[in-house]
Image: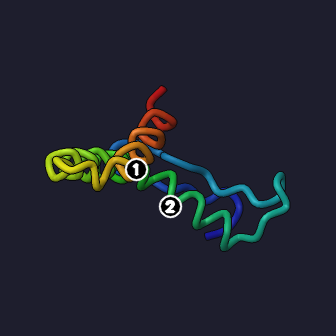
Amino acid sequence: MTDGDEVYNQFNTIASINTTSKGISEEEAEANAKLIAAAPELLEALKLIKDCLQSWNSKGTYSNLINHAETFINKATL
C-alpha cells in the first residue's frame, strides 16, 4: 500500500493511507489502516470475551480482566 490507498470493509472505505502528514512509514500506516478496518470485529470479540469471563467469575478470579475489557469497550463506544 502507498499514500492515497484505501482500506475497505464490505460496506465503505474505512481508512485512507497517508504517511506524509504524520511522518510515519508506509508499513506503519498500512498496519494502522488495517487495525481501523478490523476495529468493529475486534470490539465485538472483546464484548464476547468479557461476557465469557463474567460467566466464569464466581470467585472473582477474572475481575481484573473484566475491568480492563470494560475500560476498552467504553473507550471505543463512548
Q: Residues within 10 Å of mark 1 (few under 14, many from 20)?
A: few
Q: Residue furthest top?
A: 78
Quadrant hosting residue 18: bottom right
- In the rendered image, which residue does mark 2 sit on? 34
Q: Position of residue 15 (x, y in %)?
A: 56, 49
Residue at 36 percent of width and 46 percent of height: 43
Number of labelled discs?
Answer: 2
Work out how far the residue at label 2 is from the one at label 1, CA to CA, in angstroms.
29 Å
Q: Residue furthest bottom?
A: 27
Return the residue nearer the eye: 21 or 43.
43
Q: Secondary structure at mark 2?
A: helix
Which mark is on residue 75? Answer: none
Residue at 47 percent of width and 39 percent of height: 71
The mark that comes first in sequence, 2 or 1, is 2
Up/down of 33 relative to 69, above or below:
below
**Residue type (three-letter) at the residue carrying disc 1:** Asn
Q: Position of residue 58 (x, y in %)?
A: 16, 47
Q: Is residue 31 left or right of residue 74?
A: right
- In the rendered image, which residue does mark 1 sit on? 64
Q: Position of residue 16 (x, y in %)?
A: 61, 51
Q: Secondary structure at mark 1?
A: helix
Q: Position of residue 40 (x, y in %)?
A: 37, 46
**Residue type (three-letter) at the residue carrying disc 2:** Lys
Q: Residue furthest front?
A: 59
Q: Is residue 49 left or right of residue 73?
A: left
Residue at 60 percent of width and 66 percent of height: 30
Q: Residues within 10 Å of mark 2 (few under 14, many from 20)?
A: some
Q: Nearer the viewer, mark 2 or mark 1?
A: 1
Return the residue nearer the eye: 50 or 26.
50
Name the quarter where the N terminus is drawn: bottom right
